[in-house]
């Protein structure tokens, strides 16, 4: 019978790679809680309409990257390509939430995008995601960006660049889009890629971050959105920058940072790594003050970010695993049950270690205990079984003692730092 293979772009995470993910999630919990964030867990499957309405019909994600299918009752469902839309839906669904208060939540988990798999890009990938609802203040932007920067720092990452932009608001962006369209219309017809020829009409800002060299060349001389912000957006953006500067958070202004999702307004940002090649964006986010209304809720500002865990994992070393306290070597088949009972008791007392399921000679088992880095090898043969003792070998000093089975964990526990 043929062996069933995994789905393209979906990966298994074995230890020690999985330990990096545990570390990223635990660090997120520790760091984000300092800023008042609590964990939320939302479904991975949502109605397709949720993503179409929030991320935008004309985005690559909605047009070509979603895992969408009909369920048994012909309802269109989508595996979440990102977490923001689902978290926003959950926020609106929660009628018990006190009105008028700021809500800060974070979530970690798998996302799904039908992209061409390559280094740093999978079809199932994972994000650490933070969202803040209920404040339009630039202080919220600065706090969130500072929290992201702190998080990346506490993961131990270096060689990162924070790119910052403002995309304006419904007051000033349409005028800028019109100017950009005029500029794009002046360019030679075939200078833009086929996607951008369409975007030019539907979503001209997206032309600015197209990766096709011809489009990039045109984007270089395009009008700069930061020169066309209304006074409210300009004030908002300069407050964000003032706080970041005062807190020594280095950033570069990048007026071509447009982001691939349509819900953004005002502040947007991305963190790039200089160490991982083409897929260098390790985190991205921004303000989405119109999103909740777009989803049928009341007007409510919001801002958030997501880090790509696969890309962060490429920059991390696996955290070292603590060595086991013991290896219990059973030398005689008659002692197997007692070996297992003793080992279970040691773990209940908080010691870490393994026990053999089959009786073997002392040599290979001592070798295994040594390979695992165990502090002690506990030997249990027929003689020890009868006298209710064990032989304990200190793997560092080589010293060997015979100890009673009862009270073994206390005897070992006392000598384990
Ligand atoms: P995004 O820029 O689409 O934003 O994704 C955030 C990060 O997820 C990227 O910077 C990248 O590190 C990672 N990522 C995206 N696609 C893949 C992939 N196929 N394989 C591996 N990693 C990937 C969002 O998702 C927004 N929801 C962020 C946000 C939260 N904005 C406001 N709140």
Image (tube, rainbow, N blue to C red):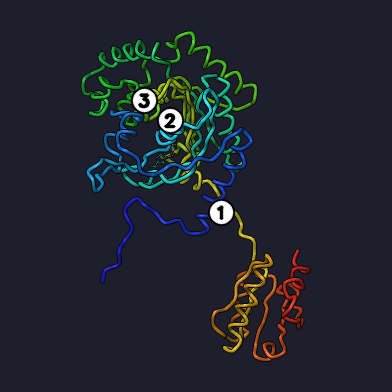
Can you give x and y, in whole percent of width and height, for residue 184 in the image?
28, 16
Can you give x and y, in whole percent of width and height, for residue 211 in the image?
34, 31
Point out the frontmost of discs 2 and 1: 2
Can you give x and y, in whole percent of width and height, for residue 71 in the image?
26, 46
Q: Of helix, strand and loop, which one carries label 3?
A: loop
Q: Which residue is drawn at 60% across and 27% down?
A: 249
Q: Of helix, strand and loop, which one carries label 2?
A: helix
Give the vertical position of 94 relative to 238 (above or below).
Answer: below
9 with respect to 355 (left or right): left
Give the vertical position of 202 relative to 282 (above or below).
Answer: above
What residue would you read off at disc 2?
Answer: 92
Can you give x and y, in whole percent of width and height, for residue 9 in the image?
35, 50
Q: In which quarter of the image is residue 279?
A: top left
236 with respect to 69 (left or right): right
Per the rendering, the mark at residue 296 is: 3
Q: How far apart are marks 3 and 1 (CA)?
A: 43 Å
Viewer-proximal residue, 408 or 365? 408
Give the vertical position of 112 relative to 268 (above or below).
Answer: below
View extreme (front): residue: 96
Give the vertical position of 360 relative to 257 (above or below).
Answer: below
Point out the frontmost of discs 3 and 1: 3
Circle nearer the N terminus (3, 1): 3
Viewer-proximal residue, 271 or 60? 60
């Amino acid at each position: 019978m043929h062996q069933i293979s995994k789905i393209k772009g979906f990966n298994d995470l074995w230890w020690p790679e999985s330990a990096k993910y545990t570390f990223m999630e635990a660090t997120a919990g520790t760091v984000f809680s300092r800023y008042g964030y609590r964990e939320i867990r939302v479904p991975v499957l949502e109605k397709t309409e949720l993503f179409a309405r929030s991320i935008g019909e004309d985005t690559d994600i909605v047009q070509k990257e979603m895992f969408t299918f009909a369920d048994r009752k012909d309802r269109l469902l989508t595996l979440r390509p990102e977490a923001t839309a689902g978290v926003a839906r959950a926020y609106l669904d929660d009628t018990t939430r006190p009105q008028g208060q700021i809500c800060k939540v974070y979530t970690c988990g798998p996302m799904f995008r039908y992209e061409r798999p390559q280094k740093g890009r999978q079809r199932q990938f994972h994000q650490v995601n933070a969202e803040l609802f209920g404040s339009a203040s630039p202080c919220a932007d600065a706090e969130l960006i500072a929290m992201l920067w702190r998080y990346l720092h506490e993961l131990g990452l270096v060689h990162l660049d924070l790119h910052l932009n403002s995309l304006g608001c419904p007051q000033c962006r349409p005028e800028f889009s019109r100017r950009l369209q005029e500029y794009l219309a002046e360019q030679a017809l075939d200078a833009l890629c086929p996607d951008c020829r369409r975007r030019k009409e539907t979503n001209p800002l997206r032309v600015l971050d197209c990766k096709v060299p011809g489009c990039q060349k045109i984007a270089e001389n395009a009008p700069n959105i930061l020169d066309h912000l209304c006074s409210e957006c300009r004030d908002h953006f300069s407050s964000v920058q003032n706080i970041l500067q005062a807190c020594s958070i280095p950033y570069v202004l990048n007026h071509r940072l447009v982001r691939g999702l349509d819900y953004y307004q005002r502040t947007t940002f991305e963190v790039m790594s200089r160490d991982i090649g083409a897929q260098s964006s390790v985190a991205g986010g921004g303000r989405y003050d119109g999103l909740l209304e777009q989803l049928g809720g009341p007007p409510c500002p919001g801002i958030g970010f997501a880090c790509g865990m696969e890309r962060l994992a490429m920059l991390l070393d696996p955290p070292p695993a603590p060595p086991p306290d013991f290896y219990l070597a059973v030398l005689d088949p008659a002692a197997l049950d007692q070996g297992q009972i003793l080992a279970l008791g040691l773990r209940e007392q908080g010691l870490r270690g393994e026990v053999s399921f089959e009786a073997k000679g002392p040599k290979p088992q001592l070798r295994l205990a040594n390979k695992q880095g165990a502090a002690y090898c506990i030997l249990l043969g027929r003689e020890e079984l009868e006298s209710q003792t064990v032989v304990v070998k200190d793997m560092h000093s080589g010293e060997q003692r015979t100890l009673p089975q009862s009270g073994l964990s206390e005897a070992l526990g006392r000598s384990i730092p």
